Amino acid sequence: MVMAVILLLALALVLGCYCAIHRQKISAIYLKPLLKNTPLEDCYHATPIEQRKRRSIWDIPGPQRIPFLGTKWIFLIFFRRYKMTKLHEVYADLNRQYGDIVLEVMPSNVPIVHLYKREDLDKVLKYPSKYPFRPPTEIIVMYRQSRPDRYASVGIVNEQGPMWHRLRSSLTSSITSPRILQNFLPALNAVCDDFVELLRAKRDPQTQIVANFEELANLMGLEAVCTLMLGRRMGFLSVNATQPEKISQLAAAVKQLFISQRDSYYGLGLWKYFPTKTYREFARAEDLIYE
């Protein structure tokens, strides 16, 4: 076990050195293609500022940065400071320690700023920018770019620049029209009613506690999404009937996607250089959902 940890640290150090030395090359591979044909003046992070002395992003309080690890060391098992299975507690604790604006740093030295105050979030969301930049989910970008036969883009959540603007504009009328939203209400009400019945059936009659509530809530979300996107009920909230195998596999695959995305973001990023367990499980889940 000790040797495995030492080898992992040595590998992380080598990869960190590579990232530091070839940062421009990595940026050209993963970031620049997403910002292709995007005028810099349309990106709010590139807007010229007044020529006066200001504190930089690196002055924002946050966990201590470590070379080649950033602030991700707080999730490493041998430090045992936080658990990736309880991220809500992690960020609540960071808020208590460092205030309403907290800096997180990726192993590649990319800064991520966390805002906790509603007023700050409001300012960012309302800032005028035609092509706002949002850090993409890298494992999704890498996988979908490797499968151009399936995906015409990396998706509206991960796209940048003109492609994002084109996707967003085509969806605006559909997701903001009161008439269209009203049409969804009866179907969503039926989903919610079934979820309430499922909770009643699953709760303990003595303690009134619902075991595995998180799993049931995930099924409710999946049922609602399928109802809206596919126009049909999938049966994830059925109380008595046994779910078909394909339905159970779909639910498991969606759960695995979120687990793999979490592990890829908060881990050391070794999946970028060779197909680790995290990447293989993510690819299998994507394949199952697509098929």
Image (spheres, helix red, strand yellow):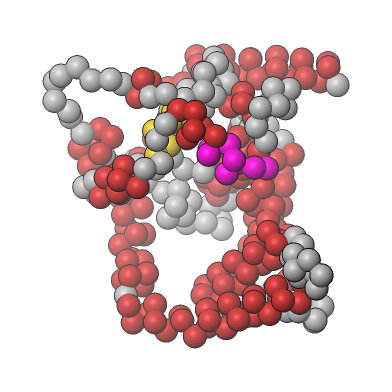
On screen, 9 above or below 255? Answer: above
Measured from the top left, where is residue 75 in percent x and y?
64, 29
Measured from the top left, where is residue 208 in percent x and y?
75, 68
Q: Is residue 39 visible?
A: no
Taking the spot 38% from the left edge, 24% from the top edge, the residue there is 60
Q: Quadrant of residue 90?
A: top right
Q: Is residue 88 magenta?
A: yes
On screen, 85 above or below 56? Answer: below
Question: In front: 98, or 184?
Answer: 98
- By secondary structure, the bulk of the magenta-drawn segment is best described as helix
- 261 relative to 170 in the view: left or right: right
Magenta stretch bounds: 85-92
- 84 relative to 137 in the view: left or right: right
Q: Quadrant of residue 240?
A: bottom right
Taking the spot 51% from the left edge, 75% from the top edge, the residue there is 228
Taking the spot 48% from the left edge, 51% from the top edge, the residue there is 154
Measured from the top left, where is residue 289 in percent x and y?
66, 62
Image quadrant containing the N terminus: top right
